[in-house]
Structures are given as C-alpha cells and as structure tokens.
Image (cartoon, rainbow, N blue to C red):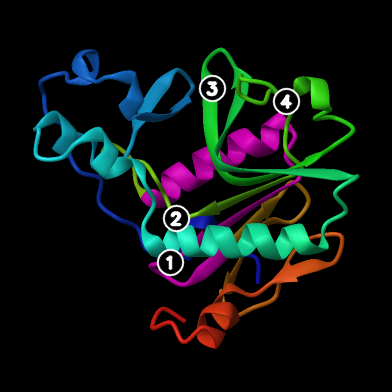
Amino acid sequence: MRKSIAQMIAPSTPRKVSARSIATQIPNVLIHEIIDGKPYYRKGYRDVLAKTKTVEDIMGSSSLQAFLITYLTIWIGKQIDEHKYHILTNEAGLHLDRKNNLAGDLLIFDSSKLTIDKINKNYASVSPLISIEVDIDIALEDLTAHSYINLKTRKLLDFGTEKVIWFLTESKKVMVATHDDGWQSFDWNYDVEILDGITCNVGQYLKDKGSEFA
C-alpha cells in the first residue's frame, strides 16, 4: 500500500516561466502561499495580470472543490469532540516562520494548543493536528503537482502536523502522509480515517448524491 509520492500522481511537465521577471509587479492578493520565502501564486493569476479576468474571478473554489470541503467540514464537525478540537476552514492561514505562510482547506487543532486567546486576526502559529487539502490552488509553473504536494506536506509535518490528507478530484485519489507511516494512497471510494475513529468516504458520498464525479 505504501508508495512514493511520485508513483501516486501522474507527473506533469512544468511550464516554463517567462524570462521577464513578473514577480515585482504582482500584487500580494494574488499570492496564495509563501514557502521558503518564495511566493506561490493563485491559479489564474496570469489572467488577472493580462486583465482578462479580475481578482474576484479567480478567488473562489470550483463548485466540486467547495462541495467536498463543505461535506468534510460538516461530516467531521458532527462527530468531533468540540471540547478537544477546533476546526478552521476557508483557506485558514498558517504562519510557520518568517519565510513560510501556508493556507489550509480544513485544519483540525488541539484546542489545548490553539487556545481561544490565540484565535485572533492573525494567521494561526500553532501546528494543526490534521491538515486536509482538496486539490491544488496554486499556479504550477516551475514545479510539478507532486513536487508541490511533497513540499507543502513536508513543511506541515516538520511544523508538527500529525497527518496530512489530500483529496485529488482529477485522479480520484486520497493521499495520506504521516511521520510514522510515510505516504499512502487510496481510491477515494475508501474509508479514510481522519482522527479518533472518524472516517470519511468521498467517493461514496458523491455516488450517493448522484454525482458524475463519483
């Protein structure tokens, strides 16, 4: 069952970045994450720069991505012990250090570590127990999908996250990474444990709803 990350995602050829540097002219609102001091831009940011789309046009998730994030949030929220855990969603910000700011689709925190006084107008600076991602939200230009997933996951695990889970709508796969077990990959028609015996099955949920993406 255990595989390398490269075996789980079909490699994609990175697109070449124009020789002309565009970074100095890109507004901060188009930055989705910063990893090791490098900005990673939102999908569609080039369309905004070319003025064929507005910032608002690219800020939202696809309906499928939003549908799955909502399902996961509600499903987990119904079963989780709200006294032990906090759930943050909606691209919740994580401040790892001065060179690393990440965004999470769904983050589960130990409430004894993310105490109420640490919930404020800044990014959370406490490591989540569980990080759940649905698809990739950055423009892939100078790296492949599996390189980005590996990079972001490693940052989270090194920060103290116990488990990182990726749901990928294109391949209909679930990828799970932990310190102890490394990487594992499953069909998304599989019961995946989140924590404390709480499981979810994205494929079955979509099938039950009659979705063509099941």
Q: Is residue 207 magenta?
A: no
Q: CA distance from mark 3 to mark 4?
A: 19 Å
Observer able to see residue 140: no
Q: Is residue 186 left or right of residue 34?
A: right
Circle 2 Cα neighbour tier, 10 Å, few/some/many (<14 / 14–19 / ≥20) = some
Task: Name the foreground residue: 139 vs 124.
Answer: 124
Observer able to see residue 173: yes
Q: Which quadrant would residue 87 be assigned to in this image?
A: top right
Tell me the magenta residue range: 145-174
- What's the residue type where badge 2 is placed? Asp
Earlier sequence position, callout 2 versus callout 4: 4
Helix, strand or loop at mark 3 = strand
Tell whether label 1 touches label 2 (CB within 8 Å). Answer: yes
Tell whether label 4 touches label 2 (CB within 8 Å). Answer: no
Earlier sequence position, callout 1 versus callout 4: 4
Q: Is residue 147 left or right of residue 89?
A: left
Q: CA distance from mark 2 to mark 1?
A: 7 Å
Q: CA distance from mark 1 to mark 4?
A: 31 Å
Q: CA distance from mark 1 to mark 3?
A: 26 Å
Helix, strand or loop at mark 4 = loop
> Residue at 40% across / 22% down in the picture?
38
Earlier sequence position, callout 2 versus callout 1: 2
Residue located beneath label 4 in the image: 119
Residue located beneath label 3 in the image: 100
> Residue at 81% across / 27% down in the picture?
116
Residue located beneath label 2 in the image: 135
